[in-house]
Amino acid sequence: MSVQQEVDESCSAERDEVAGVMTEQVGRLLASEVSVERLTAIERGDAVPALWGKFAELGLPSAMVPEDAGGIGLDIAQGMLLIRLCGYHAAPAPLAETMVSLHLWTRVGGQPVPGQVTFASPRAGRLRVEPAGSRLRVHGKLTRAPWCSDGHLLAVVEGRAGHSIALLPASALETISRKSIANEPRGDVTVDLTLEQSAKRVLPIDVRAIDDVLQLGALMRAQQMVGAMQRVLDVSITYAQERVQFGRPISKFQAVQHMLASCATEYAAASAAAEQAAGSWGRAGQELAVAVAKSRCGEAAGHIAATAHQIHGAIGFTKEYALHHFTRRLWSWRDEFGSETFWQGRLGHLVCAKGGAAIWPLLLGEIE
């Protein structure tokens, strides 16, 4: 083994240890701070948990920013473990979006910024950038940008010289605030800003980077769905063991056992696909793995949400009960950054473009 290989393995082991400690800390924090009562209060507009300050204290927003840029330096697979936890606990703050946004921004040479940062799907609309004297004018519209009322918004922009990525202050955007089915903020944004070129808020990117923005968004949502599906399954198993009907827990009935088993099967398949996609990031087969993960997680989310509500009956939809907080997020997230139909179409295009002889090497990640 070469000295460089030994150094690389040592650094990887150290990052894994850091990721493990952070995952444990984040899990404890979210478990103590995010309760069903608090989620219900947020939806009523009565209270907002002061989560963001605690995330910032732990350095979580910059978890996926390289160490030489002031971050913790987790890779995609390690960072996605934290994002999965956000889905499991229905974290009412854009930690996942901020982690991914800062990773994308610093990857192209941008400097990290404090506070919340979110990013828009390249499919969410069209922004253009053009010279305005010594400055740059960015203008256009985006739809359903997540959590875009505070901090900064990261978006792909088109220009005469190609594509760029822009970091836009949310306070300077004209936003029509909306809510997703999960009651999470989504905004329709009109952009017309003039930025100083020296501020380096608009940086050039290549075509591959544009697709990475979409793929990383899809992977983020897939991981959040896996976390929420795990929570739905946990809640359903507990309910089935506690709910007594005809003198015994409903978990003893074969029909309910079959429904729980089908949910567990779907969860296992979705979790494996999402994990494979995270591990494939930056390697041959990345797009294939992401397409499989997002489409498979979307299908599993639909099945698990419907089956869980069937097991619970009417109580699953009551505001005071936990289940709907997670199933509504599943229904929302499955359509964002590309639905199952979109990603299955991408899968078909990939396979057809390579030809029949390339299917097996493509599946093994031997070719892109």
Image (cartoon, rainbow, N blue to C red):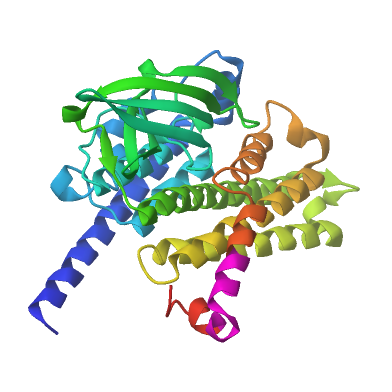
Task: Indicate the quadrant where residue 133 lies.
Answer: top left
Residue ID at (42%, 80%): 366
Question: Does residue 293 appear in this view?
Answer: yes
**Res 348 → quadrant:** bottom right
Does 98 sit left or right of 202 as displayed? Answer: right
Q: Which residue is located at x 47 percent, y 47 percent?
A: 217
The single residue placed furthest to the right in the displayed view is 246
Q: Position of residue 120 (x, y in %)?
A: 46, 37
Q: Is residue 246 above or below residue 120?
A: below
Between 360 and 59, which is closer to the camera in this rendering? 360
Rendering coords of residue 318 (x, y %): 74, 28
Q: Residue at x 41, y 19 (%)?
A: 173
Q: Is residue 296 visible?
A: no
The quadrant of the picture occupied by the N terminus is bottom left
Is residue 131 positioned above or below 73 on the image?
above
Q: Nearer the viewer, residue 177 or 278?
A: 177
